[in-house]
Image (tube, rainbow, N blue to C red):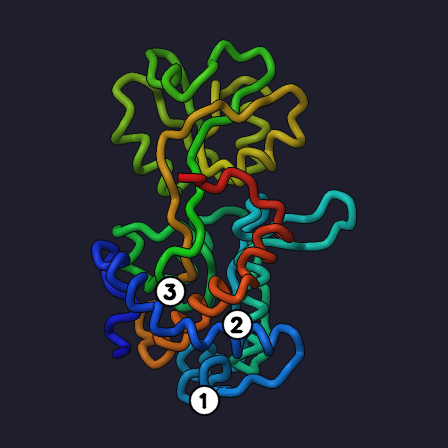
Amino acid sequence: MTTNHIFAPISRWLMLGLLSLSLVGCASDFGALIAGKPAQDSTTVSANAEVRQALAPSGVLRVGVYLGSPTSWVKDPKSGESVGIALDLGKELAKHLNVPVQIVEFDRLAQVLDSLKEGKIDFTFTNATAIRAKDMDFTVPLVRLELGYLVVADSKLQSVTDIDKAGLRVGVSQGSSSQGVLTQMYKQAKVVPADSLAKAKNMLATKQIDAFATNKGILFEMSDTLPGSQVLPGRWGLENLAIAIPKGRDAGREFVQSFANNVSQSGLLGKVIVRSGLRGTAKD
């Protein structure tokens, strides 16, 4: 497999998914490593100096996360422990690069993506869109997540088909893919950006907005702390989440794709998803 196949345009992901089957034999080695056993072929899970320099040019893998999404970073309400897919996969990748990890925290996703584009961070996990692929490189998608709406307890809105009506205000995270899609999709409802998830929650609770739109992983987290609120049944779209790295890290692309394949095939990704508490993954 050649390097330029690994981070192909979005339209070629299906082909890449088929090509990744050639790496199935690597999964057993990766699983052995997780279990604390030596891998038979360490080249599938360890990086040479060129790969390390490409993926962690500062000598540290800088992982970008934002609080409030299980796909990125949340705090377990019982233990207070920090968990999240971006957080845990970033730590795992740093181990295989044999470099320290630095968790870089942001208020919202747009800030994470800006820092990734500028090369100020080295890794995150986010929705892989064609527009974003112009500014960063993605692995093939690893998680499919439904997009929906959160409403408060006394809302008259009952399903996703009730939303696009005159006078309705729908909150979105500022700079998110939801903002771009819904601004184009709505004929009557108004899109209202919020500069953080905490601000969005307050806007919903104080009825500055009638609903908040994003992926259901975030919505269920918000609903847990808004008594009586509900995530509406149905979905208005899907997110295809993948590992993202800055453009120009060509020598590390194949390694990151192999890493993505291995965490998926070995079952580690499933464990990370459970640990994060992610809800709202697509069943079809």
Residue at image mark 1: 48
Q: Quadrant location of the N terminus?
A: bottom left
Q: Which residue lies furthest to the right in this view?
A: 79
Vertical position of residue 107 compared to residue 92: above or below: above
Question: What secondary structure is found at the residue carrying circle 2?
Answer: helix
Whether residue 173 can be seen here: no
Residue type at mark 2 is Leu
Badge 3, how many Cα within 10 Å: few under 14, some, many 20+?
few
Vertical position of residue 73 compared to residue 137: above or below: above
Alpha-carbon span between mark 2 and mark 3? 21 Å
Sequence order check, earlier mark of 3 and 1: 1
Q: Quadrant of residue 174?
A: top left
Are the residues at dot 3 and dot 1 in contact (C-beta closer than 8 Å)? no
Vertical position of residue 26 compared to residue 70: above or below: below
Question: What secondary structure is found at the residue carrying circle 3?
Answer: loop
Q: Quadrant location of the C terminus?
A: top left
Residue at image location 31% in from the left, 77% down from the top: 250
Residue at image mark 2: 93
- Give me the disc on residue 118: 3
Where residue 92 sits in the image (x, y, percent)?
Answer: 57, 70
Badge 1, how many Cα within 10 Å: few under 14, some, many 20+?
few
Residue type at mark 3 is Glu
Choose mark 2 or mark 3, whichever is in front: 2
